[in-house]
Image (spheres, grey):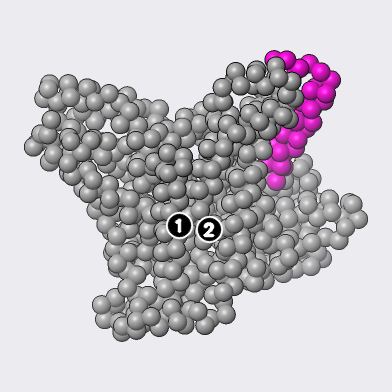
Amino acid sequence: MKNRKDQRYYHLMLIPGMIFLFLFSILPMFGIVIAFEDFKPAKGVFGSEWVGLQWFEYMFKLPDTGQIFCNTLIIAVAKILLNLIVPLIFAIMLSEVPGKHFRKFVQTVTYMPHFLSWVILAGILTNFLSLEGVVNSIVELFGGDPVQFLASNEWFRKILVISDTWKGFGYSSIVYLAAIMNIDQQLYEAAAIDGAGRFKRIIHVTLPGMLPIIMLMLTLSLGSVLSANFDQVFNLYSPVVYKTGDIIDTWVYRSGLLGYQYSLATAVGLLKSVVSTILIVVSYKLADKFAGYRIF
Amino acid sequence: MVGQDTPRYRAVNWILRVLLLLAALSCLLPILNTVAISFSSKRYVNDVMFWPKGFSLSAYKKILEDEQFFRSFWVSVKKVVVGTSINMCLTLLMAYPLSKSERIFPARGHYMRVIIVCMLFSGGTIPWYIVIKELGLLNSFWALVLPGAVNISNTIIMMNFFKGLPPALAESAAVDGASPLQTLVHIYIPLSTPSIATLSLFSIVGHWNDYFNGMILINDPQKIPLQTYIQSLVADISTKINSMTAEEIQAFSEISSLNFNAAKIVVAMIPVMVIYPILQKYFVTGLVMGAVKE
């Protein structure tokens, strides 16, 4: 079946894309050498002084580092858990409620925030959560004291986790809904004949039927424990909440692109990339082993 | 089914309806709040809940005079059109040879390995920025579309879809003397319009929503896309508001124009809202497609 002329076509079709990948993905990978240099833009990548692991040593002495890794981990893990549980419960509720049109309406509305950018949502949430905003009006109505949610170290992480879940729960539920639709109806009928109520059916038929997809989603989210969502944090945070809300990506952005500490920021970013890549590879292997799921 | 008509069953249905309605409202109300603010008069901005207070179109009239807004809107439109075209061309061109088996295209494995490495590992923001700077792309329109020219996950989804088409199609075309490019254009692409539509719509939304490239790669305000422009406004306002007391916010919103910003946010949402119904029809298929296994 191998055809010489066709081979040439195949290579030619792949070359344009490969050039872009080379320029914007592979070249930056070589760019990580600046993490081992005292990089000065004027001297360039090849002219800057080689300093070995100096930046990594410096990084571990920096008080910021522990803080940002800690923040990232707490925020990311909380998001992973809620992004699993809330869409799951939502999908089960949606599948249990009668009425096609009602379901369609709820789905249409809840999928929407997923498609809006964090820039837009940050604008909306800033209005919604400000001291004079809707949430605080309701808090005051019930006699509470108004809270500056986005400027409070006590609240900021909670807001990040809640708003991230809020943006994605509808859209993420699609996968679980598809899993529920695939469960054999006869199992439900058998359970009903055995006298199982709705709750028992969910526990003994729906959830076990969804177990593979739940495990798969959990495994695949392993790769994001060091990515707490730059776009969201960046658009919602302010210097007041750096203590609880600053994550690796936002710190790298500030110290590197705004503070011109190119080498240090690259070193921190590199550490994150390496750990994330290892976790992703492990999670793909696990997903393949336990769920038979292969991406490639 | 048995036991579906008991009072208890119906009561639970009502509880479910109420809870799901609350979930839907939670998604709708914050957006509605900003829409209401945008239609309110400046004086009442802080009292607005979900319905405009002191209805006024002044914010929208002001947008008509905001040159920067229109310039950025136009940049965003260009970015969406050019960016999506590049994305889709490259996706189709790459997905076709990659969908061939190693028997037909022995070099496939090498290309796949490169693609997987690019997908799993990244050099990080700083080296990426330096490369783009060295290529002389800073401050140019191309910085908004070229760095993301290849969308790896779209390519893999498309590749998996092509794999699902019968190989006999390509074989018989080859017998008739068609080159692989002709086979792609005349046979594969017409057969995969739904998938192409889905991926294009996702690409459109992605390009429209992207603010990051515009923020760090473009300094000239003439050339920034709309999301970057709005990002700068929102960041400005939220840093101020977050450090103010309630009285200060009152005073601030009288002199500033929260309703003006709200109106810009609303206009920036419109394109996504217009595409959304079409998108919704397709994206379930899109997700299922992505799960197709080798």
Could you classify mark 1 by the number of other residues whose Cα lies within 10 Å: few (under 14), some (14-19), or many (20 or more)?
many
For mark 1, give the secondary structure: helix
Q: Name the residue at 33% across, 64% down.
A: A28
Expressed as whole percent of the image width and height from the top left, the position of residue B76 reads 45, 48
Q: Chain of mark 2?
A: A
Amino acid under label 2? Val
Quadrant housing the C terminus of chain A: top left
List the residue tagged with mark 1: A279
Asked if residue B209 shows in the view, the reply is no
Quadrant housing the N terminus of chain A: top left
Q: Which mark is residue A225?
A: 2
Amino acid under label 1? Leu
Expressed as whole percent of the image width and height from the top left, the position of residue A88 reads 63, 39
Expressed as whole percent of the image width and height from the top left, the position of residue B213 reads 43, 58
Dominant secondary structure of the magenta stretch? helix
Q: Name the residue at 41% across, 64% down.
A: A274
Which of the two labelled residues, at mark 1 and mark 2, occupies the earlier sequence position? Answer: 2
Q: Chain of mark 1?
A: A
Q: For residue B12: magenta?
A: yes
The vertical placement of A17 against A131, above or below, is above
The vertical placement of A264 against A160, above or below, is below
Q: Are marks 1 and 2 in contact (CB under 8 Å)?
A: yes
Please report the bounds of the magenta region as a residue range: B1-30
Q: Quadrant of residue A172?
A: top right
Q: Which mark is residue B14?
A: none
C-alpha gap between disc 1 and disc 2: 9 Å
Q: For residue A93: magenta?
A: no
Asked if residue A153 shows in the view, the reply is yes
